[in-house]
Image: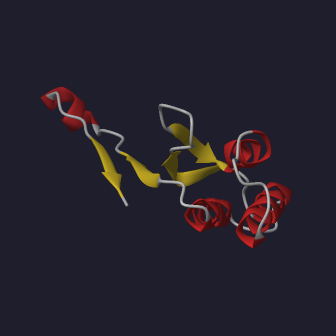
Amino acid sequence: MFSTGDWTFGLEIWLPGIPNPIDIRGTDEASALLAEKWPVTFGSAFERALSTCAAVLDGTMPPDSAKQALIDAAEAVGIPWMDRVYHVPSRSDVAAGSSSLNYSH
């Protein structure tokens, strides 16, 4: 059995008609996004994303599988996304007054 927790790194998803990106940090959030706000609710990538989220929540697939399935669903319909890499500062970073938030795609 796999953990059904949050992903290693979250995603930002830009849905049509929503001015700000939606921050998705785990399978629960991805599943809710697909069910409630996803603009294209048909096609193999969408269906695969839904079934992958269900399998992750059942504990039969690793959490990052749902993240990749959501990315695939986004790319299949041209929805922009970005990996969100969170930096947790060490004590020395905090003492020095530095922290960072990195983005990549």
Q: Quadrant of the C terminus?
A: bottom left
**Percent coordinates x, y for residue 69 in the rendering:** 66, 65
Question: Left or right of 29: which side holds 13?
Answer: left
Residue shown at the point (77%, 39%) measured from the top left = 36
Q: Quadrant of the N terminus?
A: bottom right
Of the pair 13 and 19, the residue shown nearer to us: 19
Of the pair 43 and 91, the residue shown nearer to us: 43
**Percent coordinates x, y for residue 29 in the rendering:** 68, 42
Q: How is the image coloured?
A: secondary structure
**Percent coordinates x, y for residue 59 in the rendering:** 81, 61
Residue shown at the point (43%, 53%) measured from the top left = 82
Residue shown at the point (34%, 44%) measured from the top left = 87
**Residue 11 visible in the picture:** yes
Residue shown at the point (64%, 59%) measured from the top left = 70
Of the pair 56 and 16, the residue shown nearer to us: 16
Q: Which residue reaches farthest bottom?
A: 44
Of the pair 71 and 10, the residue shown nearer to us: 71
**Percent coordinates x, y for residue 33 in the rendering:** 70, 43
